[in-house]
Image: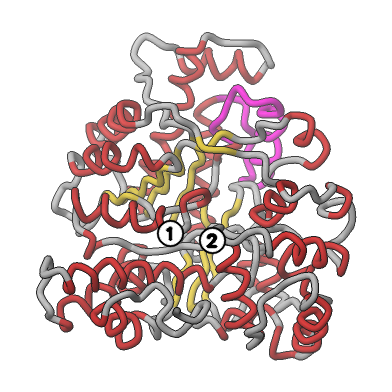
Amino acid sequence: MKPFLGEDFLLTTEPARRLFHDYAKAMPILDYHNHLPPEQVADDARFGNLAQVWLGGDHYKWRLMRANGVPEAHITGHPADERTFQAWARTVTKAVGNPVHHWTHLELRRYFGIDEVLSEASAPKIWKAANEQLATPEFSVKNLLKKMNVVALCTTDDPADDLAHHKRHTGAPVMVPTFRPDKALIADAPGWAAYLVRLGKAAGVEIRTLKQLVHALELRHKAFHDVGGRVSDHALITPWATPAEGVNLEAVFQTLLAGKPATERETTALKTHLLLQVARLDAEKGWTMQLHLAAQRNLNTLMFGKLGPDTGYDAVSDEPVAQSLARFLDLAARDGTLPRTIVYGLNPASHDAVTSVLGAFQDGGVAGKMQLGSAWWFNDHIDGMDLQLRALANNGLLSRFVGMLTDSRSFLSFPRHEYFRRVLCRLVGGWVDEGLAPADYGLLGGLVQDVSFNNAKAFFGIPGV
């Protein structure tokens, strides 16, 4: 019987153990997609207790607590405190088999040196030990990041944000914004016209025409670039891919701005045009475009009304994505504006289709230009990571992959990179053990180091990294 989360956790062969311990383990972390609050990084914030840093915004844990029968009043009904922590302690004992059970204990170990398994009985001792450490300067945000060897963060930011926190941030790690223009592009969403007023103020222009909207996006894109931003990000079920032929885009813009409905084809043509404009800006500046696909959001409208978005009421979509993705990429390629692109498929059934589509748009100009993104959200568990890596290896070049991200709102989430690296080394080491790959540790050690960090450093080109 192996120890729980022992030194060789997930490393089932000698080649896997060698690849992880000798090559992957010590690599720095470039977390190129997360939802961390930039103000807390710039302020080098401190946390009053373990619940604040661990449970205050973690809807992964909230979903499990709800599934365990914990009332909402004990989850989000008050600021995260010992009551929230106790509810999580009661839940985590029921979460064996869920990746969050692993993450919970990796986080206790890697940050706090606490090896004890969390339970209702051990909770008071763990609460006291962790809080004593959090009360010290060594557990400020920047020191938490340093502890995990995080050298760079790409936060997720709206084009209308003033980026003040990024501008005043100093020291390690490097922190740059990611351009997330969904609110500007989804022209049929409630509140779109009001949002354009906010965007116009941030850009210093009035937005009353489609041309002015594109100009405002150009100005804000440049502002992000000037403070180190090198990535855009888009959350879509499928990419919009309706050509503008036969559609008066300005007329559609004016109709929607006035709060009147347009036809589905007209609206989608406008959104396609706007997404292509962001692709153009990305391509012109050498940025990377991230497309996060297949997430159904805010399904529980009652709870959405009470708690708002990003509170644990989202799910995987089974809508096909390959055809619309291919059409969108083709539109950008025909215009000569297809940037480096990472496509994250939340539905794992799409991995082979997405990877095959991306292969049709590699152009030889940039190694790994079109990438199947890491296993994220509902897939960032052992099986999901393994499946994504195999799909990428089977239909592309695993050696060019930019690796893992946290996609997290928690400063304690960075052991997920270790989790990923162990899965990666288990896979590659298993190939060696089975005679499917050569026992060349110069080659394979370099591969796991590249996927762990080096590829992301080269691919994104973030200043200061």
Q: Earlier in the sequence, mark 1 or mark 2?
A: 2
Rendered residue at 56%/29% (across/down)? 186
- In the rendered view, would you say 176 is above or below 146? above
Q: Quadrant of the C terminus?
A: bottom left
Vertical placement of 273 versus 373: above or below?
above
User: Which residue position is annotated with label 2?
Assistant: 99
Q: Quadrant of residue 447?
A: bottom left
> Foreground: 4 or 323?
4
Number of other residues with Cα within 10 Å of mark 2, as a class: few under 14, some 14 to 19, many 20 or more: some
Q: Position of residue 289 (x, y in %)?
A: 39, 48
Marks 1/2: CA–CA distance: 31 Å
Camera sees residue 200: no
Q: Position of residue 426 (x, y in %)?
A: 31, 70
**Residue closest to the eye, 428 or 310:** 428
Q: Residue at x 80, y 67 (%)?
A: 85
Vertical placement of residue 257 versus 447, above or below: above
Q: Amino acid at mark 2?
A: Pro
228 and 97: which is toward the camera: 97
Residue 363 is one of the magenta-drawn residues: no
Residue 202 shown in magenta: yes
Label 1: element kind: loop
The span picked out in magenta is: 184-209
Identify the residue position indicated by label 1 in the image.
Answer: 230
**Which residue occupies 69% across, 25% down?**
190
In this rendering, position of residue 173 left or right of residue 72 = left
